[in-house]
């Protein structure tokens, strides 16, 4: 599914019909959460790179994610660096831990886990603050 004006959820999950969800970028509603790995192996505080969210562009146009934000229910916010874009069908993994951005990987550089193991919601907003993705998960 794609198009504008709604939040796209993988697996046909909940969508938002809020008019404010319409994004300025063409086909921005095509951004999907492909996977949430909230429960890192072993000690989560020592293995933050194994906590991550994978985003996928399910649309037919390139998505410029520069300045977009990713947040959880608790209000932790990550801002996507300038120059970050996703081609159609491409994925991008946002890891909670520290590292060097590149090769389809972004690093939040958070000092502790962000995503709740028992469930949370991933919110993505454009650089203008428009909600384009709201995906809840339960582990």
Image (cartoon, rainbow, N blue to C red):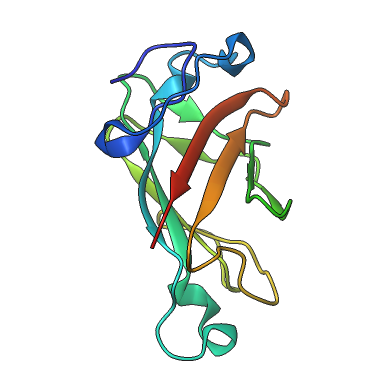
Depth check: 77 or 138 in front?
Answer: 138
Residue 128 coordinates in the image, percent (x, y): 73, 23
Q: Is residue 119 above or below residue 18?
A: below
Please name whichever residue, 107 or 72, is drawn nearer the observer in this view of the structure.
72
The x and y percentages for residue 108 are 63, 62
From the top left corner, tell me how far across and down residue 58 is, in percent: 31, 29
Left or right: 134 as drawn, with respect to 68: left
Q: Quadrant of residue 19?
A: top right
Does residue 62 sit above or below 85 in this rendering?
A: above
**Residue at the image position 43 percent from the left and 16 percent from the top:** 27
Image point 57% across, 72% down: which residue?
A: 99
Residue 62, x across and y down, in percent: 41, 25
Assign the N terminus to one quadrant of the image.
top left
**Which picture quadrant has residue 48?**
bottom right
Q: Quadrant of the C terminus?
A: bottom left
Residue 72 lies left or right of residue 9; in this view the side is right
Q: Residue at x 43, y 25 (%)?
A: 15
- Image height check: is 101 above or below 62? below
In this rendering, the count of numbered labels is: 0
């Amino acid at each position: 599914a794609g198009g504008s004006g709604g939040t796209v959820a993988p697996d046909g999950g909940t969508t938002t019909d809020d008019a404010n969800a319409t994004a300025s970028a063409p086909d921005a509603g095509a951004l999907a959460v492909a996977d949430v790995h909230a429960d890192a192996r072993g000690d989560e505080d020592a293995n933050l790179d194994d906590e991550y969210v994978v985003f996928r562009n399910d649309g037919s146009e390139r998505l410029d994610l520069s300045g977009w934000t990713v947040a959880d229910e608790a209000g932790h916010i990550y801002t996507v660096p300038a120059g970050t874009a996703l081609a159609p069908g491409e994925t991008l993994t946002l890891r909670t831990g520290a590292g060097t951005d590149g090769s389809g990987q972004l690093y939040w550089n958070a000092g502790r886990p962000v995503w709740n193991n028992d469930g949370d919601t991933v919110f993505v907003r454009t650089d203008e603050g428009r909600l384009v993705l709201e995906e809840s998960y339960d582990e």
